Image: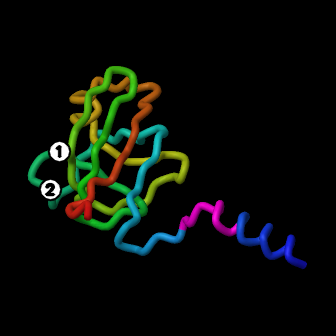
Amino acid sequence: MKYKIILFCLLASCVNNTYLSKNSFTYSAKGFAKIVNHSFPNLENNSFVSHNKLKLGTKIRLINPVNGKSLEKVVKKKVKYDNFYKVLISVEIAEELNLDLNFPYVEVNEIKKNKT
């Protein structure tokens, strides 16, 4: 019986606690971006970022892992797209990052305002 309690305490202390509050969650993903070349009427320019899961106004960093170029943008539109894609971006942003338009592989990281 003593060994079971000691074993349980050892196993419980080694468990990685993955319980995160809603405010401490940061989104991070690597995958393909969907590139669109049409504009939306409410946006001032054609450069936009859209995401399925992130709220409007969320700051994200888009990184091209091939050449290391990165951009910080704000999610301005909520558009439904296939779950295969990690983010929906405009052609202008793809050109700024020098993405391959046939295989636009990007890394998407959410930027938190308060890191404490």
Mark 2 and mark 1: Cα distance apart in space? 7 Å
Quarter of the image for residue 58 reads: bottom left
The spot of residue 21 in percent (x, y) is 43, 74
Considering depth in this image, is 58 or 114 the residue closer to the camera? 114
- What is the span of residues highlighted in magenta in the rendered image? 12-18
Q: Which mark is residue 60?
A: none
When the figure is inspected, residue 14 is found, relative to residue 46, above or below; the finding is below
Label 2: few (<14), some (14–19) or many (≥20) C-alpha neighbours in 10 Å: few
Identity of the residue drawn at 40% across and 64% down: 25
Asked if the magenta segment contains residue 15, the reply would be yes
Which color scheme did the rendering employ for the protein? rainbow
| Residue plotted at (39% across, 48% down) | 87
Say whether marks 2 and 1 touch (CB < 8 Å): yes
Which of the 4 image quarters holds residue 14?
bottom right
Disc 2 element: loop
Residue 105's spot in the image, x, y percent?
A: 44, 32
Label placed on residue 46? 1
Frontmost residue, 9 versus 66: 9
Give the amino acid at mark 2.
Leu
Q: Give percent across and percent down for residue 23.
A: 35, 72
Which residue carries the number 2 mark? 43
Q: Position of residue 104 (x, y in %)?
A: 42, 31
Residue 77 shown left or right of residue 27 in the figure: left
Q: Residue type at mark 1?
A: Asn
Up the image or down, 83 lies above or below 66; here it is: below
Image quarter in which the N terminus is found? bottom right
Residue drawn at (39%, 22%) of the image: 66
